[in-house]
């Protein structure tokens, strides 16, 4: 028996219904024309925490025992998962500690603290922050909540796939960000159960794409953590990865990588053409289509726009830079 089944996704949907939003799935005429396909955008930017992560966090915390809830939780995050855990923990009256690496952006740390989380900046990368979270869990009796490598978290993210299927049963390709693998793994599980012919495509940044390199190596690997506009996708998958590596290896058909200028262009495209505020990691599915990294001509496509928690000053600078390049005839 596989470690996660469709019944887990249906159970998750019922369990988390009161804590998450069923997000929009909108047709994009502009992107459809560029790709010669029918492209729809799954707007997880509409979640109350600004990103899809609240689905998995809610499903995990809602299954904790009264004793576990009384002691609280600890997690490691580059921002969005920590914010989701903080939000759900606050709603349930629980203590939440979030260990973050030094590269995490200040506005994301502030957002977690605003929701009542105890944020500990520890280590230079996600692996070091995770080690600190593990040590704290053992010392203080807190429950460790993985940002991706947890069956309840994967099932929660997989509810996105259920929503896509219900609203777009003709779906032929799904394109989603790929980092730890909980998001795309859960979605692909739902879609492949409906039809094995549905293509699942994962998109990462070119700087330190750990899951993509792990797939090439046939086992989980470590890479140096680098700064990227797609900050929410940075970090490792764990050398002792239990679930997501095998799930992605089994269910994902294709991967694509974006360079920093391509991520920037996707963020600006989302703002200007789609009127959407999207962070770097949340824009990579758009970027893969925008820059023709995958062939979807003639297909019905769902692109998961996974997060909106961008530093607005950064987005403004990118948009102004693009406008300046157009006015001077330079490259965008």
Image: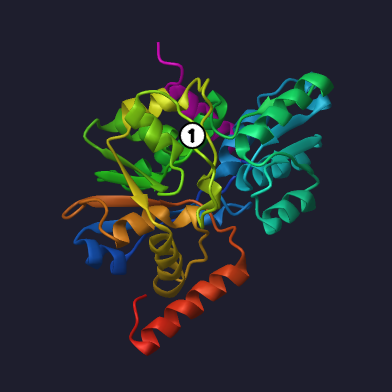
Q: Position of residue 198 (x, y in %)?
A: 25, 38
9 in magenta: yes
The answer to whether residue 157 is left or right of residue 174 is right
Q: Residue at x 61, y 47 (%)?
A: 80
> How many tags in the picture?
1
**Image quadrant where one finds the N terminus:** top left
Q: Magenta segment, which residues? A: 1-17
Q: In the rendered view, how is the structure colored?
A: rainbow
Res. 12 in view: yes
The answer to whether residue 269 is left or right of residue 64 is left
Pointer 1 local density, CA inside 10 Å: few below 14, some 14–19, many at least 20: many
Q: Position of residue 316 (x, y in %)?
A: 56, 75
Q: Is residue 278 above or below residue 206?
A: below
- Main SS of the magenta part reads helix
In the picture of the structure, the residue carrying the numbered disc 1 is 182
Q: Residue 197's image quarter?
A: top left
**Image quadrant where one finds the C terminus:** bottom left
Depth check, front residue: 199 or 236: 236
Q: Position of residue 258 (x, y in %)?
A: 37, 54
Q: Residue at x 48, y 54 (%)?
A: 282
Q: Residue 287's image quarter?
A: bottom left
Q: Residue at x 31, y 62 (%)?
A: 290
Q: Residue furthest bottom?
A: 327
Q: Is residue 85 above or below residue 103?
A: above
Res. 189 in view: no
Q: Residue furthest front?
A: 224
């Amino acid at each position: 028996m596989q470690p996660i089944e469709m019944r887990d996704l249906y159970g998750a949907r019922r369990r988390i219904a009161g804590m998450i939003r069923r997000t929009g799935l909108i047709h994009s005429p502009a992107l459809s024309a560029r790709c010669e396909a029918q492209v729809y955008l799954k707007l997880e930017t509409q979640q109350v925490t600004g990103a899809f992560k609240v689905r998995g966090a809610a499903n995990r915390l809602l299954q904790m025992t009264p004793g576990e809830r009384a002691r609280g939780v600890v997690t490691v995050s580059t921002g969005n998962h920590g914010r989701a855990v903080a939000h759900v923990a606050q709603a349930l009256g629980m203590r939440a500690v979030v260990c973050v690496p030094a590269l995490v952006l200040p506005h994301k740390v502030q957002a977690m603290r605003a929701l009542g989380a105890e944020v500990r900046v520890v280590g230079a990368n996600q692996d070091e922050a995770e080690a600190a979270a593990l040590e704290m869990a053992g010392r203080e009796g807190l429950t460790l909540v993985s940002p991706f490598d947890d069956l309840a978290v994967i099932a929660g993210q997989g509810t996105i796939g259920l929503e896509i299927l219900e609203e777009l049963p003709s779906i032929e390709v799904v394109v989603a960000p790929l980092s730890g693998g909980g998001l795309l793994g859960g979605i692909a599980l739902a879609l492949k159960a409906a039809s094995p012919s549905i293509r699942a495509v994962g998109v990462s940044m070119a700087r330190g794409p750990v899951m993509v390199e792990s797939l090439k190596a046939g086992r989980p690997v470590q890479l140096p953590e680098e700064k990227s506009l797609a900050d929410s996708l940075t970090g490792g998958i764990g050398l002792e990865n239990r679930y997501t590596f095998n799930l992605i290896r089994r269910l994902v058909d294709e991967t694509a990588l974006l360079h920093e200028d391509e991520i920037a262009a996707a963020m600006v495209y989302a703002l200007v053409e789609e009127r959407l505020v999207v962070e770097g990691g949340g824009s990579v599915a758009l970027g893969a289509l925008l820059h023709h990294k995958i062939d979807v001509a003639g297909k019905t496509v769902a692109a998961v726009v996974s997060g909106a928690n961008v530093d607005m000053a950064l987005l403004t600078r990118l948009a102004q830079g693009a406008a300046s390049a157009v006015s001077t005839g330079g490259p965008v």
